[in-house]
Amino acid sequence: MSIVYINSAACISVQDTLNENFFHNLKLENSTQVLKAIEPNYKEFIPPAASRRMSKTVKMSSVASKYALQEAGIENPDAIIVGTGMGCSQDSEKFLKNVIDNNEEFLTPTFFIQSTHNTVAGQIALGLQCHAYNFTYVNTSSSLEFSFLDAKLQINDGEAEDVLVGSTDEQTDRTMELYQLNKTIKKEENLPVDYLNSRSEGVIWGEGASFFVLGKNKTKNSYAQLKDIQISSRLDLEETQQFIEDFLAQNNLTANDIDVLILGFSGDAKSDVYYTKAMDLFENSALLYYKHLSGEFNTASGFSTFMACHILKTQEIPNVMMINDLKKKEIKNILLYNHLGGNDHSLVLLEKA
């Protein structure tokens, strides 16, 4: 299989990640139940008439994808692939509210049309007038990883040279209320959260959009090589280390070859045990975490991939992400491990470009 490069990375998140100096201005977010993304001034990117008809996730994705394509120097990608867990939740809620309020009669189709999960990829393609391969993955917390896998296959099979890959999820008031009722979101009395030593269940929920251009050829802007991806929908706690070791062995690596391990500690005591188990394998690696910066959501791994790209490029690690004090002189291999509530485990291996 040929090498696949990540040639650009753009992210809208609860941090000011569109700002060039974001890397040194990351702020811990541990005392609010729900975190809102820092949004750009959409008027600079989207005509106001069009913007009014777009949900938050479509607007975030449109801007993030423009940044990613601009950085990669590409006007029209050979494919657009988007991963999302919840899709266009705002328009889904509006449509369902209309159904109830109007007794299932005299409904306008707009909210229904815009509520489908593939609206994001479709809107990006419409904006670019791109008629190439267009696909959306809806696989909860491994949606981005499946998108990366597809892009990798497209490039390796000679179907595409440059692929726009993104992940996006938004919040809606009603869904957040339901998440609080079923204890997905932490109770107020359990705030602020100590992400690494939490004894309570539930998470702080976030949102965001992350977009990357994957390419066949290395460029001067290349961040990383996307070496390999492994996904498992179910995993017993005792199988965690074997799952990681087998993945590394497939890539002719051991735990000692991993310079940085990025873990998805979410503050949920019940499911964070997987990360604690994984840490024991990596005595000689820099251990990092990130959901205290982004919040937990279906495609939070987009934020960690974005951070990993910048760590590889700058060879710097933000202190706010560090679990241990170990620092490597050179950062070559980064392993990302993520899951959501103990399900849909994913491993992503990145290597310095």
Image: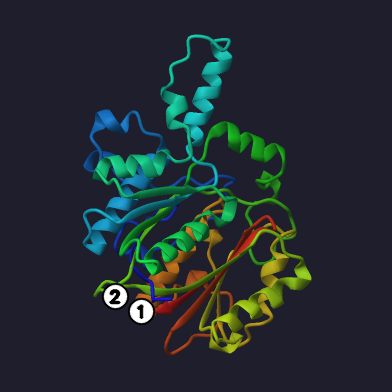
Task: For residue 237, say whether it is visible.
Answer: yes
Q: Earlier in the sequence, mark 2 or mark 1?
A: 2
Residue 154 % position (x, y): 40, 62
- The quadrant of the image that shows the C terminus is bottom left
- The quadrant of the image that shows the N terminus is bottom left
Q: Disc 2 or disc 1, which is closer to the eye?
A: 2
Residue 166 % position (x, y): 41, 54
> What label sits on residue 218 in the rendered view?
2
Q: Viewed as shown, does residue 130 lie left or right of 168?
A: left
Q: Amino acid at mark 1?
A: Ala
Using the rendered view, name the quadrant where residue 10 is placed.
Answer: bottom left
How was this image coloured?
Answer: rainbow
Q: Which residue is mark 1?
A: 353
Under circle 2, the secondary element is: loop
Using a 10 Å C-alpha cutoff, classify the residue at mark 1 as few (fewer than 14 neighbours), some (14 to 19) or many (20 or more): many
Foreground residue among 213 and 313:
213
Check contact, mark 2 vs mark 1: CB within 8 A: yes
Q: Amino acid at mark 2?
A: Lys
Task: For residue 39, say whether it is visible.
Answer: no
